[in-house]
Image (tube, rainbow, N blue to C red):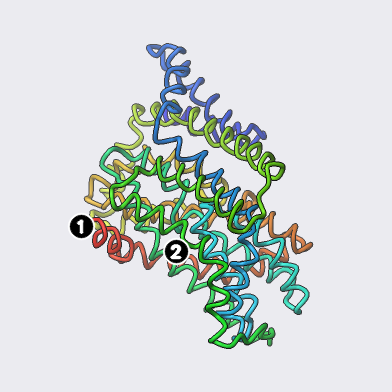
Amino acid sequence: MSAILIGGFFLFCLIGVPIAFAMGLAAMFGILWHDTLPMSLLAQRTLVGADSYALLAIPFFILAGNLMNGGGITQRIIDLALAMVGRFRGGLALTSVLAAMIFSGLSGSAAADASALGKVLIPAMKKQGYGGGFAAALMASACVNGPIIPPSIPLVIYGLSAGKGVSIIALFLGGIVPGVLLGLALMVMAYWISVRRNYPTTEKVPLAEIPSRLVPALPAMLMPIIILLGVVGGIVTVTESATIAVLYALFIGKFVYRELTLRSIWPMLVQTALDTALVMFIIALSNGFGWLLAISGLPKALAAWIASVSNDPTVILMLINVLLLVIGIFMEPLPALLILIPVLVPVVSAVGIDLVHFGLVMVFNLCLGLLTPPVGILLYICANFAGVRLDEEVREVMPFLYAGIGVLVLITVFPGLVLWVPTVLMAG
C-alpha cells in the first residue's frame, strides 16, 4: 500500500494537483486498494487531523505576525539593525540579515518576513549599488530563519505530530541557537562577498546613539521574550501564548506605534483566515495519508534498512539529511513534515535520537528547501522585489545555501547546540 500512497501522491503533484488534494486522493486510492478498509475512514481521519485544541496556536500566531508586520515595526527594526552593523563593509547586507533575525522572533513565517522586509531592503540595496540577484538571494536566505527562531508554526506542527513525548516549548527553545548560528553564518558570507565586490558601508551611527534606535524597537522585540517566558514559566500554554501575542500586537500597533486602524486590521484578518484555511486543509488531509503510511509497514521497513546500514545515530541523521535535502527541492516544508514525520520518527526513536534534536534538524533542513527551485517560495518573493530573473538569483544564493548546510551539519553532529538552551531553562 505504501507504493500506492507515495506513487499516487507524486503522480498527482506532477500533473498539477494541489498538495492537499494530492494527499487526499492518494489516501483514497490506498483505501480502495486495501479491501478491508472502509472509505468512511478517510473522512474520519480528516476530521481527527483538524480536531486539536493545540492547533489553535496556528491561526493566532499567523494573526500576530500579520498585525506586527502591519503595525509599524519594520522600519524601526531596520533602523536598529542599521545602527548596529551599518558601519561595516556591506553594511546594508548585514542589516538585512540582522533585521530578519529580529523579525523571525515576531512572525514565525519565512514568507511573511520576506514580504515585510524584502520590499524595503531589496530596493535599498539595489540603490546603493548591490547587484539585484545578490540582494534578492541574501534576503531570501536571511528569511529562512523565520520558522527556526521561535515562535515557529512548523515546530508547532512537528510537536503535535511527533507524539506526546515531544514538548513544543523545548522545540521553541531549541531553535534559538540554530537560528543565531544561521544568522551569523549568513552575515560572515555576506561580509566576505561585500569585501570582494567592494560594496559600500551604509551608516556609521555613533555608539552613543544606538540606544535611541533601540527604544522605538524595544516594544516589538519584547514580544518573543514574553511568549517564551510565559510558556517556559508554566504561566500559559503554547496556544494561550499565541492569543497573548495577538493582544500584545494589537496594543503595540494601535497605542504605541499608532499605525493600526480598524480599516487596516480588516485585510489582515482576511489574510489570516486564508492562510489558516490553507494550512489546516493540508493538516486535515495529511492525517489520513500519514495514518495509512504508518499501517502500511513502511516505517518499519525503512528502520530495518537504515539499521542494516549503521546503528550510529549520527550516520543515520546524515542519511536522513540527504533524503530531506532532496525532498525539500520538490516539496514545501509543511506538507513534507506532515508526510515524513510518521515515517521518520519511529526510525530515529529506535536508535535513541532525541526527538527535540531531530525536530530542529528536520525543520531546519526542510526550510533550506525554500531556497531551491522549483518550489522555493522565498526565491520567487524576493526575485519579484528585486526585478531579476530566477536563474540570476539562484546563482547568487548558492554561497548562502552552502552556509546553511554547514550550520545544518553542525547541529546534526553536535546535539548540544539544540538541546542546551531547553535543558538549562526547563530544568530551572
Residue under pointer 2: 179
Q: Locate residue 288 relative to residue 140 in the image: left or right.
A: left
Q: Residue at x 59, y 67 (%)?
A: 77
Task: Rate crowding at label 1 as few (under 14), some (14 to 19) or many (20 or more) other CA atoms within 10 Å.
Answer: few
Q: Residue at x 29, y 52 (%)?
A: 233
As rendered, which of 387 and 217 lies closer to the eye? Answer: 217
- Position of the C terminus, as image quadrant, is bottom left
Give the CA separation, mark 1 to mark 2.
22 Å
Q: Position of residue 321 (x, y in %)?
A: 41, 56
Q: Position of residue 225 (x, y in %)?
A: 41, 59
What's the amino acid at mark 2? Gly
Residue under pointer 1: 427
- Position of the N terminus, as image quadrant, is top left
What's the amino acid at mark 1? Ala
Identify the residue at the far front of this view: 255
Q: Quarter of the image holding residue 16? A: top right
Name the mark nearer the viewer: 1 or 2.
Answer: 1
Q: Identify the element where label 2 is drawn.
A: helix
Q: Residue at x 69, y 85 (%)?
A: 200
In the image, residue 55 above or below residue 1 = below
Q: Quarter of the image holding residue 114? A: bottom right
